[in-house]
Image: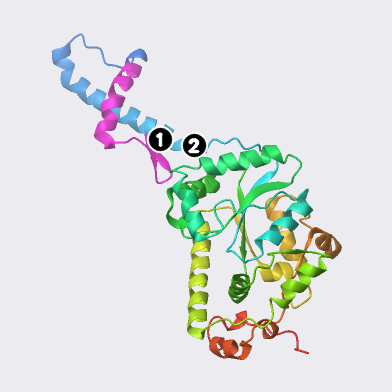
């Protein structure tokens, strides 16, 4: 038996269905005393055959109606996850999109920060290698999350950072995991989908390619902060055609990821780095953070104060907010992006001194 179109049907069509239903139906009819007496078989044979055919049709129709009325039992993956344990979640974003700081804040404001790990690989090459060794099922996902739950019982959330490189679309183990995330209940595995201004992503990549500075600086670490800010000034983006092509490629990839999550009905919430950390130079948007915690079901889903948010943020910004300070070729970039769909990526907030 299989399910089709939201209803359960018997495989093999009507003729096959009657083939296996007939003995059972006849047995039921006999026990109920509904079969016509066969004392005078020759005289009543035609009438009896017609009567039996009618009863078979009625019985088969009643049985099918009974099956149609039954609730559909969806196949739910078995799991070692504890519904009463920390909420399992995945932070999904491109590299250089602020996932490290976001992971930290979510952990600190929901109970405790757990180690941040790019479990599926921090580059395309690493991601390909990871999924090549995971076969065709979802064991890698569930086993990892279960270990995290057991290890960090006092945390509000546990999970990992998934950088959605190309294997997310075609690796069998990745697809199996996405399907499990889509269907698993009690507990649900939730995805926080984070996107960042793609020009800032490119600038950050450029900075960390040229310099061996730390990815993050803790508040109060003046040496790290000074080095981070100095290496964030007057960066050259490269040729305009190359820059535009990179932006186009990243934009298309990000949209593909969003489409995948939507089409697979993955439980997720969409947030942006710019709203989480810098809205018009005034700091993070409280409502954007509350949206995250409301979705996860832990932490301050309402009445979050800026003081609480600041205490949860242990990292300090290591780049100036204005592109006119970050980019050595700001005017060239501004001219190249003007009139394109990427024009709004450019922001200028601070004067040079």
Q: Is residue 157 above or below residue 233?
A: above
The furthest residue to the left = 42
Q: Residue at x 29, y 31 (%)?
A: 17
Q: Is residue 62 above or below residue 306?
A: above
Q: How many marks?
A: 2
Magenta range is 1-29
Determine crowd level at label 2: few under 14, some 14-19, many 20+ residues with C-alpha closer than 10 A. Answer: few
Determine crowd level at label 1: few under 14, some 14-19, many 20+ residues with C-alpha closer than 10 A. Answer: few
Question: Is residue 90 left or right of 289 when viewed as pictured?
Answer: left
Q: Is residue 56 above or below residue 348?
A: above
- Residue receiving disc 1: 65
Q: Residue at x 59, y 76 (%)?
A: 199
Q: Secondary structure at mark 2?
A: loop
Residue 54, visible in the rendered structure: no
* Quadrant in the picture for residue 65: top left
Q: Residue at x 74, y 78 (%)?
A: 280
- Image coordinates of residue 247 in percent, x first then y, are 52, 76
- Image coordinates of residue 315 in percent, x first then y, are 76, 63
| Picture disc at residue 73 | 2
From the image, which quarter does the C terminus lie in?
bottom right
- Image coordinates of residue 324 in percent, x first then y, are 68, 86
Of residues 318 and 184, the one nearer the viewer is 318
Of residues 27 and 220, the one nearer the viewer is 220
Q: Are marks 1 and 2 in contact (CB under 8 Å)?
A: no
* Quadrant in the picture for residue 291: bottom right
The mark lying in front, picked from 1 and 2, is: 2
The furthest residue to the right = 307
Q: CA distance from mark 1 to mark 2?
A: 17 Å
Question: Is residue 190 left or right of 125 when viewed as pictured?
Answer: right
- Image coordinates of residue 1 in percent, x first then y, are 37, 34
| Picture disc at residue 289 | none
């Amino acid at each position: 038996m299989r399910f089709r179109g939201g209803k359960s049907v018997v495989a093999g069509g009507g003729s096959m269905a009657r083939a296996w239903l007939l003995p059972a139906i006849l047995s039921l009819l006999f026990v109920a005393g509904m079969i016509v007496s066969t004392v005078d078989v020759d005289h009543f044979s035609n009438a009896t055959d017609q009567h039996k055919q009618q009863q078979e049709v009625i019985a088969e129709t009643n049985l099918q109606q009974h099956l149609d009325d039954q609730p559909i039992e969806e196949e739910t993956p078995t799991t070692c996850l504890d519904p009463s344990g920390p909420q399992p979640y995945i932070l999904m974003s491109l590299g250089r999109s602020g996932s490290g700081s976001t992971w930290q804040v979510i952990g600190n404001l929901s109970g405790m920060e757990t180690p941040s790990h790019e479990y599926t690989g921090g580059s395309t090459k690493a991601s390909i290698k990871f999924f090549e060794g995971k076969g065709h099922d979802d064991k890698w996902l569930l086993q990892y999350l279960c270990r995290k739950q057991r290890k960090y019982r006092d945390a509000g959330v546990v999970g990992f950072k998934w950088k959605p490189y190309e294997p997310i679309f075609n690796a069998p183990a990745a697809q199996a995991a996405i399907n499990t995330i889509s269907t698993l209940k009690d507990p649900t595995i939730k995805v926080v989908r984070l996107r960042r201004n793609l020009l800032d992503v490119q600038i950050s990549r450029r900075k960390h390619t040229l310099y061996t500075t730390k990815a993050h600086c803790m508040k109060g670490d003046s040496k790290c902060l000074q080095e981070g800010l100095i290496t964030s000034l007057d960066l050259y983006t490269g040729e305009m055609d190359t820059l535009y092509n990179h932006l186009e490629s990243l934009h298309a990839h990000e949209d593909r990821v969003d489409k995948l999550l939507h089409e697979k009905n993955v439980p997720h919430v969409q947030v942006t780095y710019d709203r989480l950390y810098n809205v018009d130079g005034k700091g993070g948007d409280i409502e954007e953070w509350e949206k995250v915690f409301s979705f996860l079901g832990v932490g301050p889903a309402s009445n979050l104060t800026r003081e609480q948010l600041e205490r949860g943020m242990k990292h300090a910004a290591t780049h100036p907010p204005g592109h006119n300070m970050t980019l050595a070729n700001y005017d060239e970039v501004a001219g190249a992006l003007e009139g394109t769909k990427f024009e709004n990526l450019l922001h200028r907030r601070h004067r040079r001194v």
